[in-house]
Each structure stands twice: as structure tokens, then as C-alpha cells.
Image (tube, grey):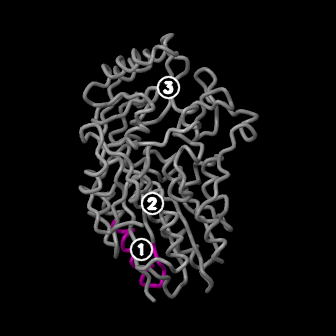
Amino acid sequence: MFDKTLTPDQLFERNAVFNKSGMRPDAQQNLVHLRKFIGQIASGKHPDYQLGSKQSIIAVGIDSLNYGFAKNNLTPDDLYCVSTIFPSTSSCCWIASITGKGPEESGVSGVVFYSEELESMYITHLDKVQQGKEWVAHPESDAKLPIGNWDSVFLDLNAMGYKTVCLDGFFAYKITRWSQGLHRHAQHVVKSSGAWLDILMGCDEMVDSLEKDLKDGIKRFVTGEPVFMWNLFNFDRYIHHRGFTDELGSAVRRMDSMFHEMAQQGHLVIVYADHGQTPHISVHSQGEEWDALHDSPQHRLPFGGAGRVRWSYPVAGHEDRVARELQDLVGENGVVVHRDELHKHGICNIGPRMQSQMGEIITLATGAQFPTADFKNTVIYEHGSITRDEMLVPVAVYRAAV
């Protein structure tokens, strides 16, 4: 399972790809194994951890917190540096953390991908298909593209006799088959008290909401028998637009104090992130050139992906030409590869499902400047690709008082 002694440098070095401009997910020290990690603790089989006096495990997922920032602001009993999966986007990483499934198994290759079943581009976070420039609901998506019917850590702990609870702070504004699928096996799903659409840029307000939700959840559900509570907490939008600020650090340290207090009260607390973020520079002209290239006859479909990974669907026989044009566009800030190279380098398992969803040509950001969809130039941090700060994330454990 996870190794506490493995340093970020060691993890990066043993997984470096493309002349150390990025890294592949580690085979063992990987977010995809978090489900097993929690299961070991819950079953009493982990050699280092046991339930405390409250017989509870509280798991908090923090969207976008990279390892370095966590190390500087969290003081848990144990802090593990682990790699996330590829693509390093929430659409894939949250699934991996609680189901143990990568994109090939989960059926979600990213935010935007081609659905062979729906014969259209599909966007996970909206649960819609593309018609022209619009995203619209598909009347047969449930039957033709089933998403969300995943087994998960909730199912594991249900079988162990735990009361399982999802506190839905993250889902307050992401209600799709994807988000609902993450907690489908939780016995109790509790809506957050926070007005999340109004507080996504307010660090203190978000922490206030988390604290109230956790305390209310503990009061309601921790009554003597084993309990597992899971909450997704969203710093993602804040970091996209403001970065890793002192204000954010103060909020994370405040959360750290709260987690210590809960551990002292007898709750075992696990805190982790789905992916990190890295500095980003959006150039409007570059984005326009990207769109123009994909409007040409040598592309059979619009592009997919999200953030700092984008893929293209060239007409057969035009793959090499498309790759050259895209490499010229991104220059030293990116690497353009054929899809099968992701499998070759151990970045992603490319099986039949990924071959149908992901385009043949993949453009990976390795530097700060990259043609994302941010035409307003408001995003200063981004993610989705394979650089160190996107890929290395924390798993923190606050040991419960017995």
C-alpha cells in the first residue's frame, strides 16, 4: 500500500517521461489505490491505523490541492505523496479515488470525449451531447451510455457493517449522472448547508460550510456503530482564478486545526486531493489558431479533453499532419503524441473503450502557455496534463484518539 518514506523527488524520478517534462501515474503509490487503503483501515487490517473511540472514518477530498502546498499547510500525523491518474481532471480522478477504476474501466476518459454509443461528443460535467455549438440533453443517454453505475468504497464499507454517509458539498452545483454515481452506494446523502454557487471564491465561507456540515454529520450519524463519512470540498475554481495564495494557505491551516480537533475527539480523518494545479498562461491568438485548425476538413470531429490535455480526431491518413501542426502551435510548452504512445509510456491504459472515446492525437501541456478554452484570460492555474504539480497529490491521515 502507500509508502510514507517515498519522497516527491523519488516518485517523480521513477515515473518521468518525455525527458522529465512530465510523469506517468505510479503503479503503486497511486490515487487509484485509495479505495483499498480505506478498506484496510476500516477492516482493521492496516498495520498503522485503527479506529478511535468514535468508531468513525471521516474522509475529505479537497479538489485541486497539490502535494507541495499541502505539505506547507497541513500537519497530519502521516502525509503520503501519491500520484493521481491521467487525465488529471476531476472527471476521472474522483472516480479513481473511491472506485479504484481508471478511465478504461469507468467509461469516463475526460471532461469531453466522443461517445460511440450516442454518436456525438459528450461532456461529463453537464451530461449533454454536442449539437453544433450547443450542448443539449440526449433522450437516450441513460440507456446507451450508462455512466455512474460504479461499485465503490461505500459498497465495501456497507458490507463491513458501516453506516455510510456522503455530505454533498461538491455536488451542490454538479448534479449529473457522473456526480451522482460517485455516491450512489452511500446509505445517506446529505445536502450541504452552504450556498456553494455563491461561495466558490470565498475561502473562509467554504471552510465555514465544511465545518458546519461535518459537525452536523457527526452529531446526526456518529452514534456508536462504525460510520464512514465522505465529503468533497472544492477549492478548484478559486485556485484556477487566484492561485495558491496566502488566503488559501490560511484556510487550509484552519481546516488542519479542525481535522486535529476531530482526531482528538476520536475520529480517524483522511484528507486527500484529486489533482494539483500549475501556473497557466492563456493566449487568445493561440486559442483561435487551435479552433481554426480543428475547423479544417482534416478533422472528422470537434476536439475533446479539457484544460491542459486536449485530443483531436483527424480523418484517417491525416494523423501525422495534424500532429505536426499542433506541435508547431504549442512549441516548447507541449508534447503532441499518438494515442497509443500514452499506453506505451504507461501514462494511461488504452483499451477498446479509450480507443473509441479519445482522439488519435493527444496534445499534452508541459509548460505554462497552452491553448485552453479560456479566451477571457482569467485562469492563471490549470490542470489535466502530466507535469509534477498536476500529478502529485497528498493523502493525509490524522490518527484518532483511542
Q: Looking at the image, which residue sits at the far front?
A: 344
Above-or-below relation of 375 to 153: above
Q: Which residue is mark 2?
A: 205
Please state which of the two labelled residues, at mark 2 or mark 1, is closer to the viewer: 1
Foreground residue among 246 and 34? 34
Q: Gap between marks 2 and 1, in whole Å?
A: 17 Å
Q: Which residues are magenta?
A: 253-269
Q: Which residue is mark 3?
A: 303
Q: Secondary structure at mark 1?
A: helix
Residue at point 44% right, 57% down? 31
- Residue 344, percent from left and from top: 40, 38
* Mark 2 nearby-residue class (10 Å; few <14, some 14–19, many ≥20): some
Q: Which residue is mark 1?
A: 259
Foreground residue among 189 and 77? 77
Residue at point 31% right, 49% down? 15
Q: Give, as a three-letter code, the residue at label 1.
A: Phe
Image quarter in which the N terminus is found: bottom left
Q: Earlier in the sequence, mark 2 or mark 3?
A: 2
Asked if residue 266 lies in the magenta stretch, the reply is yes
Which quadrant holds residue 171? bottom right
